[in-house]
Amino acid sequence: QSSFSVSVSFSSFYCLACSSLRNKPIKSEKGMSTPETRSRAALRTARRVLVKAGTSVVANENGKPSLTRLGAIAEQIGELSRRGIEVIFVSSGAVGMGKSLLRKQGRMKMSFEELQIDSGRPDGISAGSPPTEGMYSRSNSLKKSTGSFSQLLQLDERPHTLADRKGHYDSACAAAGQFEMMNLYHSLFSHTDVALSQILVTQADFIDPKRLETLAYSIERLLSLGIVPIINENDAVSGNQGYTDENVFSDNDSLAALCARNFGAEVVLLLTDVDGVYDRPPTEKNAKLLPMYRTGSEVAIGAKSAQGRGGMASKIGSAQAAVAPGSSCNACVVVSGSDLNSIRAILGPDPKYGCKGTLFVTPGTELEKQALADLAADTTNGDVSEEARIAATSARNEARKLQAMPYQVRQDILRAVAQALLDRKDELLAANAIDLEAAEKDGVAMVLKKRLKLTDEKLSTLASGLRQIADLPDPLGVVKSKREVADGLELSLITVPIGVLMIIFESRPDSMPQIAALALASGNGLLLKGGKEATQSNAALHRVIGDAIESGSGGEIKRDIIALITSRGQVADMLSLDDVIDLVIPRGSNALVSYIKANTRIPVLGHADGVCHVYVDSSATAENASKLVVDAKIDYPSACNAMETLLLHKDTIQSGVASSVLMALRVAGVKCLGGPTSMKM
């Protein structure tokens, strides 16, 4: 009884999580909202979890262990252990590791004559490889010719069908590979200060009540001492026999489900080689990741991985078995093991990595009700990824049309946009006033409200900047460098458009004209996602810019070249469009940039914290230095390029330049804090 006492109920953890989250937005670092739902947040409260890594995660395509993925798994399990979470680890890969060892040993044991014969075999077949009919007959003939003692033990006297020999071969691989696998895990986990144990099981261990009771007690004891049990099927005994549905477990996916139900796991993670469960094979066009799997969900299963025994059908069945009614396990997530933050994203303390994988929940529980409510809310918000895909495709088409036109067309468009900002400023300021009023009601920080506010001066500055860009030479087709790399072979570096840019910015609506001008000048398409604080301002600016693009080009270029995503859906959906978006540029806080980098495969042009420095050299005059330093600080203090650190050459102290600059800052209302060296001087 005590072996199952800690698994009392995940529902109680869920209720606690939901009560603390009720009427509160889910936040990540520095208060930035993330796509995490309440049902996903509840998973972070689990105190006992099971993580299963399949062969496609443990091993690379060449059969060798993936140190990158395994190292990430070890590090993340170590983080869970340090937080007091008990972890059961079910791992595949022993047979694969054993095959490499058997091949190596097989060659080392061969005589010179056998080595010559072996080198003439077809590609991929060598000593120690899985047996085939032809290989078996050749092996027997070689043994007879060598006269070694081993030929007295003729395999012909044992079951010798090809299937039998394959089973014996896999058993030998498992026996050799288990040691190799545990040795590797010991090396990786030792760096995380996590103690390990190995448990090899067969079906008989779950059928016999006495053996199951002993096994449960052993695991309970290990977990209570902070030891992570690594569980695997004992293929050296079972022979990897090609199970059917009638078996207790048919692969390590179903073994993981069985362990979760019997050993009190509250959440199960099935790590696989894809991001989760898709409505069709993920290699097919427009395949969609299911955030939640429900009974009756339409899923087309593709080919399984060539490395493992299971496939997506096996994982779906095992996930459903793990969360079947009556189990202490209420949640299972099928997620990519290639994502080095997948365990952190689901079970870690910080939701900054977003929702990953496909969630399975126990039918009829409070967790299922919340997950269904979250799914319904997400559906109501619209399919952002599809909206973004259509918009990105249209932007790409219009950008290609613009690239084929003379540079004069791009210049005319920029001048038209600049003039429109001035002609329709009343419309823009009225929309901005709505956002400012909403920000006041919502208690938005003062620094954000300053960034949000549009003024006549800001619009005039924007218009002037756009005209300056229009007056610049054509940035496309410029030969930056040229080099002859061989006789008749010349390598040139020429400027070209990037394609479709996705720009994510927070509460500065004046960013939109700046971004649009640079994109239009360089012939790129734009996909924009602005902060919710500036919804009305962004919509008005996008409308004004779109009208100016069409009028400035004489109707040749449509407003679709710049698209504004207005849906309330999740940013994570847009970040999955790596096939239609060429570059992501996040403008805003360091928290925003970090989130974008962690949640997309699209190249990201990010930045770090903006700590802007101004250096005053000994050659500077007091008048010029004072004007420049004061302007750098007070012209727009809330902007990311406002001065934060002033560096003074030591000679400016004797010349009086330093005191003049500091006095000018104080007169302007700037408080100066000196570093230890400067205060001494």
Image (cartoon, rainbow, N blue to C red):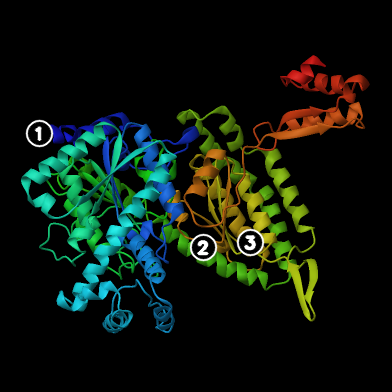
Residue 392's disc number: 2
Residue 173 visible in rendering: yes
Out of 546 and 196, give the one closest to the viewer.
Answer: 196
Whether the residues at callouts 1 and 3 have beta carbons within 8 Å, the answer is no
Residue 277 visible in rendering: no
Kind of residue at badge 2: Ala
Secondary structure at badge 1 equals: loop
Is 126 drawn above or below residue 629 in the view shown?
A: below
- Position of 155 with respect to 79 (left or right) is left
* Cα distance between the residues tagged 2 and 1: 58 Å
Residue 621 x/y as whole percent: 92, 29
* Figure quadrant of residue 546: bottom right
* Neighbour tally class for label 3: few under 14, some 14-19, many 20 plus, Cα within 10 Å: many
Residue 1's disc number: 1
Out of 72 and 461, give the one closest to the viewer.
Answer: 72
Kind of residue at badge 3: Ile
- Position of 674 with respect to 32 (left or right) is right
> Mark 2 or mark 3: which is in front?
2
Secondary structure at badge 2 equals: helix
Residue drawn 20% across the image and 43% down it? 330
Q: Earlier in the sequence, mark 2 or mark 3?
A: 2
* Cα distance between the residues tagged 1 and 3: 73 Å
* Neighbour tally class for label 2: few under 14, some 14-19, many 20 plus, Cα within 10 Å: many
Query: Circle 3 is placed at which residue position?
Result: 549
Kind of residue at badge 1: Gln
